[in-house]
Image (cartoon, rainbow, N blue to C red):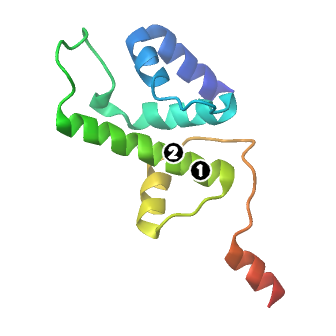
Amino acid sequence: MAQEEEVSEYLSQNPRVAAWVEELRCEGETDKHWRHRREFLLRNAGDLAPAGPAADGAESGSRARQLQQLVSFSMAWANHVFLGCRYPQKVMDKILSMAEGIKVPDAPIHTTRDELVAKKG
């Protein structure tokens, strides 16, 4: 649980980041899924997360696109881990590299269609 404690401590020390990332949670997302997807978002947010005083203008188009891409990658990763979804290899390589170091100890184990066919063959 050290990983969870590190994230919680970081968020308690950075309330603007905590509020920002909480806005990215999907309605109906379970606590378990959110806990890990939130870590994915925080590890990869870079300068997308708020750092200093609140900005007085709207997000730039480029920044908004980068944030949307990050959210999309985080959801693809969570879908892969928790639901067994697969994506084109380029996407899988990207999300797995972005998630490097994130431990999901109680993740379900999924059997792919190709593995099922190979067992019957």
Residue 117 as seen in the image, left or right of residue 62: right
Report the disc number at residue 75. Answer: 2
- Local packing at callout 1 (Cα closer than 10 Å; few below 14, some 14-19, many 20+) is some
Report the disc number at residue 98. Answer: none
Give the amino acid type for the residue marked by disc 1 in the picture. Answer: Asn
The picture places residue 118, in percent across and down from the top left corner, at 75, 84
Figure quadrant of residue 94: bottom left
The picture places residue 22, in percent across and down from the top left corner, at 49, 21
| Furthest residue toward right | 120
Vertical relation: 30 (above or below) 77: above
The picture places residue 107, in percent across and down from the top left corner, at 72, 46
Count of marks placed on residues: 2
Alpha carbon distance from label 1 to label 2 = 6 Å
**Residue lying at 72% horizontally and 41% vertically, measured from the top left:** 105
- Local packing at callout 2 (Cα closer than 10 Å; few below 14, some 14-19, many 20+) is some
- Label 1 residue SS: helix
Q: Mark 1 touching mark 2, by CB under 8 A?
A: yes
Quarter occupied by the N terminus: top right
Q: Nearer the viewer, residue 44 or 30?
A: 30
Residue 28 as seen in the image, left or right of residue 26: right
Residue position marked by numbered label 1 in the rendering: 79
**Residue lying at 68% horizontally and 78% vertically, measured from the top left:** 114
Vertical relation: 117 (above or below) 76: below
**Residue lying at 21% horizontally and 27% vertically, measured from the top left:** 59
Give the amino acid type for the residue marked by disc 2 in the picture. Answer: Met
Q: From this viewpoint, is residue 42 visible?
A: yes
